[in-house]
Image (cartoon, grey):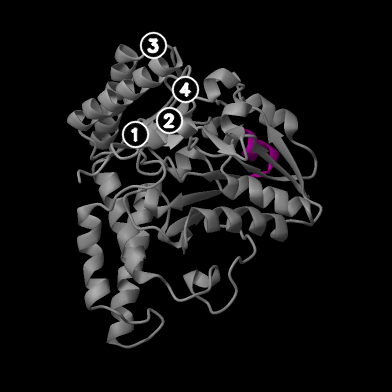
Amino acid sequence: MTKPIYLDCNATTPHDPEVIEAMRPYLEEHFGNPSSSHYYGLKTRKAIETARSQVATLLGCGPEEIIFTSGGTESNNHAIRGIASAYRDKGNHIITTQIEHPAVTAVCKYLELYGVETTYLPVDECGLLDAADVEKAIKPNTILITVMHANNEVGTIQPIEEISKIARRKGIMLHTDAAQSAGKISVDVVTLGVDLLSIAGHKLYAPKGIGVLYIRKGIEPDRFMHGAGQENGKRAGTENVLEIVGLGKASEIACRNMERNIRVMRESRDWLYDGIREKVKDVRLNGHPELRLPNTLNVSILGIESHTFLPTIQDRVAAAAGAACHSGEIRISSVLKAMKVPEEWARGALRLTTGRMTTHSEVDMAVAVISDAVQRIRGIKT
């Protein structure tokens, strides 16, 4: 059986072959505990510090500002809960948006049970936050602003640099979830002006189960994991050496090939969009037409319901839906709701995300599969 064409890179990416090769010695040979002072431990300790430097280069920060975690969710939890706890004497108000990943919104909802107040800011019809709304939402007790760098569903890139100027002027910390943007566009923390930033390895052609939290020097969130003194005392637990090495290598590759990868992903994404529009009528783009991740295409097709459409093509094309059906009720994604996408369009939303390994021939085949399936469904309905 031929494998389906993979157009779900915002869900996870395949492992880069160079990443696999970099990890192999730490699966087969170098097994030592990095906390051990003998040869075996020193070998893995050096590997971790090499990876830390590789990630730091990607982010434009110092290696001492990099903390390895179990993934983007832990990084977001550590950043938001850690700041809320450590700075509770200064205030209890957090500002975020209506389109954040659950790894942010669920944390805010949890903290609300303990007296933390959260403001969820709206976005426009392109999924873009107005920085002026952030400034208006600031209160005397605001301690943290957390806004994703780029949206996982529609790819819209937020004005983090503009928001950071507001945050700095007001003396408020800024966190950004960069799980989707790292490796696809620049995530230089100095340019962005952020105090904390989260990365998920498996969005970056590294393994699942590894992530990073950048913490600007001088910021001290409370510990999220308690135990021994790993990660400069900021995150306890024996390090996941194998996957740390993988994320380090993936970061090195992302730095080395950034311009090329952006061009390749944008070409395949636009090739896909043009092909669908050429063969399918009544197609709507969701997300900002320009301020968008180079690999992300979210389109709505009028007259189809994505949650039933995708199963009809899943043996040929792997993609994601913008709506789901639960107990007979169709639920539109919170992102599309926040963007006020009309329900008749939101029901047919598809997230098609290419990768740096996606070929034009694969895109052509995907267009053919999608357009044929749409025509069949529309033919049956008529």
Q: Please name the residue that numbered disc 1 is placed on.
A: 313
Left or right? Give the position of 312 relative to 95.
Answer: left
> Considering the numbered disc 1 on the image, is that residue within a helix, a strand or a loop?
helix
Dot 3, how many residues are within 10 Å of its Cα: few (below 14), some (14-19), or many (20+)? few
Residue type pointed to by label 4: Ile
Classify residue 131 by image quadrant. top right
Tell me if label 4 and label 3 are in contact, CB under 8 Å. no
Q: Please name the residue that numbered disc 4 is placed on.
A: 304
> Considering the numbered disc 3 on the image, is that residue within a helix, a strand or a loop?
loop
Tell me if label 1 and label 2 are in contact, CB under 8 Å. yes
Discs 2/3, front: 2
Q: Position of residue 103 (x, y in %)?
A: 58, 49
**Is residue 229 a member of the stretch shown in magenta?**
no
Q: Position of residue 92 (x, y in %)?
A: 78, 50
| N-term mark: 2 or 3 | 3
* Residue that lies at the very extreme toward the left in this rendered image: 361
From the viewer's perspective, is residue 142 above or below residue 244?
Answer: above
